[in-house]
Amino acid sequence: MITAPRLTAEVLLCHALRQERSYLYAHADEELPEVAWIHYGRYLHERLQGKPTQYITHKQEFYGREFRVTRDVLIPRPETEHLVEAALARIRPGDRVFDAGTGSGAIAITLALESKAEVIGGDLSTDALRVAVRNAHALGAQVQWVAADLVTALADRSLDVLVSNPPYVPRVDDPGLQREVRDWEPHLALFAGPTGLEIYERLIEQARRVLRTDGWLLFELGYNSLGPVERMLSEGWGELEMRQDLAGFPRVMAARVIC
């Protein structure tokens, strides 16, 4: 089943025409050129096979900016903007900020453009980093990029703020995922392990090594992860704050390292 079928059809038609949606209403009586019909038919076929619209158009808006997305990166979600807002509230001018598992670079690039911090983005996937680099160049963002498994490549006590939207889907949830997610988005960025908590454990442990005293760790929460994550932060962390998304679900956790 395709959600919002009319909107999807319009977006794909605009992509075939290489025009904005307003063009459809201003030229409603015009016939499609043959080449546009060919492209439109191919895009519709791909969407009916489950390919997400964003991977067809290679576009996704995030925090008011257009990002390029490919199958090498997760599609940025609006809910992740809550993580950006929580981070911006804590970043001071000149802070050194790291985005672990940067993917398309949406978080790192947004933080670089919205703050006066030194921002670094890291990802284990070099294919994802190539997408992030392209996005940074297109949007004029000054971001350093490193190929790294979480923060393993960073020196001790080298960061003021660490942000991440880590993999948090348990492997057992694989069959129940939407086919657009399960069959198309990169599993490296989706699945954390059997419980879905494995990356949180590693991230929190590594964060204590790389964050300076009073530095901040902020990350996105997965379904039913709030309780276990709070227990992971019970020692050595303070000023814990959870933010809900617009649907009322726990979405962002912030914690300050105290030792």
Image: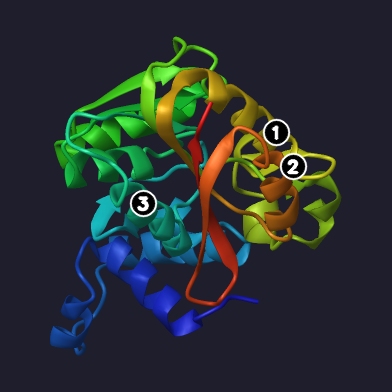
Q: Quadrant of residue 137?
A: top left
Residue 32 visible somewhere in the drawing: yes
Tag 2 residue: 197
Furthest residue in direction bottom, as rendered: 29
Sequence-wise first label, 1 or 3: 3
Residue at 63%, 41% (x, y): give it. 167
Residue 57: give x, y in percent of width and height: 37, 55
Picture coordinates of residue 21, whole percent (x, y): 23, 75
Spot occupied by residue 102 in the image (x, y as percentages of width and height)? 44, 35
Residue occupying image coordinates x 35% and y 44%: 106
In the image, 31 versus 60, the foreground residue is: 60
Query: What residue is pinned by disc 3?
Result: 84
Q: Secondary structure at mark 2?
A: loop
> Could you tell whether 52 is left or right of 146 in the image?
right
Q: Is 153 displayed left or right of 179 in the figure?
A: left
Asked whether the beta carbons under mark 2 and mark 1 sit within 8 Å of each other, the answer is yes
Mark number displayed over residue 103: none
Whole-percent x, y for residue 85 in the image: 34, 56
Q: Quadrant of residue 11?
A: bottom left
Query: Which is more N-terminal, label 3 or label 2?
Result: 3
Question: Which residue corresponds to mark 1?
Answer: 201
Amino acid type at circle 2 is Leu
Q: CA distance from mark 2 to mark 1?
A: 6 Å
* Front one among 137 and 109: 109
- Compared with 80, 189 (above or below) is above
Q: Is residue 19 above or below residue 166?
A: below
Quadrant in which residue 205 is drawn: top right
How many labels were placed on the picture?
A: 3
Q: Residues within 10 Å of mark 1 (few under 14, many from 20)?
A: some
